[in-house]
Image (tube, rainbow, N blue to C red):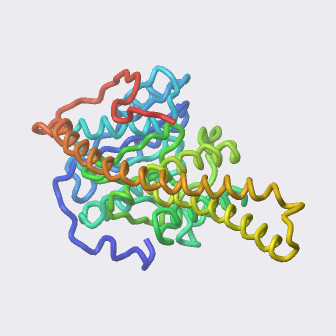
Amino acid sequence: MNDRYDNLIDVEPVSGQRLAVIIPALNEARTIGDVIDRIPREIDGIDSIRVIVIDDGSRDATAEIATQHGATVVQHPRNLGVGAAFAAGLEYALRSGADVIVNMDGDGQFRPEDIPDLIAPILTRRYGFVTCTRFADVEKLPEMPRIKLWGNRMMCRLVNAIIGGNRFTDVSCGFRAYSRDTALRMNLFGSFTYTQETFIDLAAKRVSMTEVPLVVRGEREHGKSRVASNLWHYAFRTSSIILRALRDWRPLLFFGSIAVTFSGLGVAMLAFVGWWWFTFQQTRPWTSLITVGGVFAVMGVAFAVLALIADQIGRSRKIQEQLLYMQRQQAYARSGSELDRAPPLRENLIEPAFQATTI
């Protein structure tokens, strides 16, 4: 960890915490066993550790191998997507009584040995969400195609602009840690991926967030990424999720931007026609711009009204989310030493209850 991030672990960590490591996996039989075995079994401040593998419809022996290596396996009968698998893992971890939750991939790109560094800011209670960054430290930059590096940077700039401020250097990495309170507050809707949406959701709820630079393998050793294997498809799907999150959490900005755009175009067209009439005493050949400009101006006003209505709905949503948070606290209340007592098991989960809506 470089000097920029050293102050994240200067505070004395809390003790007696329960850690759950969730690993969404799809056809990772060749790597899942090694990933599980490399997860530290003793971490300062952590009393118990449980590994939860979400088998998202694998056609190989991922579930069997994960069980043999001591993990709890939650199985989807079909592939539901990374976002849905993450939601299922989050639900199971909360139900198991975890205080700290780590999410990582099962393909071996992330180093399980780095989990103590990743959760250190959580254990100080200074942060509720910690993400690994691949790009903050030039000495730890992973090898990847330039187009992927450029895409990551553009996505990072977009998310930083939405949440307000240039704060993060990596918003797409799946190696992350959450406090229990943060996990209870999260509401994600994207079944394809969850990485960027998480930032927008937690920033809107004013959860304290930070990033820790860690070494990550740039390319998978086996197979292809099921999320970013096609860059243009990935960009389209993630952009859709981000725009919907922006619509939900910053409706004034979302609809207001559309209103300003239409109003600006409409006023510009009408102003141009007015100038033309004063100069040449006629509207031809721009007569049609009067109609088009008028329509654009009316649409701008309509979107402005919609922005105000959406903002009012957004206020109600915040109240509803707070009520949902309190209900989850009660629903996932821990009873005794459930995490320590429960043996590794395999469950079939048709749909994750933690996430009721998918995109």
Q: Image check: 53 left or right of 109?
A: left
Image point (24%, 59%), residue name: 44
Question: Quarter of the image holding residue 55?
Answer: top left
Q: Residue 222 in the image: state x and y as whole percent.
A: 63, 40
The quarter of the image holding the N terminus is bottom left
Q: Nearer the viewer, residue 308 or 35?
A: 308
Q: Residue 101 in the image: state x and y as whole percent.
A: 32, 48
Image point (16%, 53%), residue name: 16
Residue, far front = 281
Q: Residue 321 in the image: state x and y as whole percent.
A: 29, 46
Q: Residue 209 in the image: state x and y as whole percent.
A: 37, 63
Residue, far bottom = 3
Image point (48%, 51%), residue name: 306
Image point (34%, 50%), residue name: 40
Q: Image check: 334 left or right of 353?
A: left
Q: Nearer the viewer, residue 11 or 87?
A: 87
32 to 194, vertically: above or below? above
3 to 259, vertically: above or below? below
Q: Nearer the viewer, residue 44 or 24?
A: 24
Q: Nearer the viewer, residue 135 or 165?
A: 165
Question: Quarter of the image holding residue 234?
Answer: top right
Number of callouts: 0
Question: Quarter of the image holding residue 283?
Answer: bottom right
74 to 306, vertically: above or below? above
Residue, far left = 336
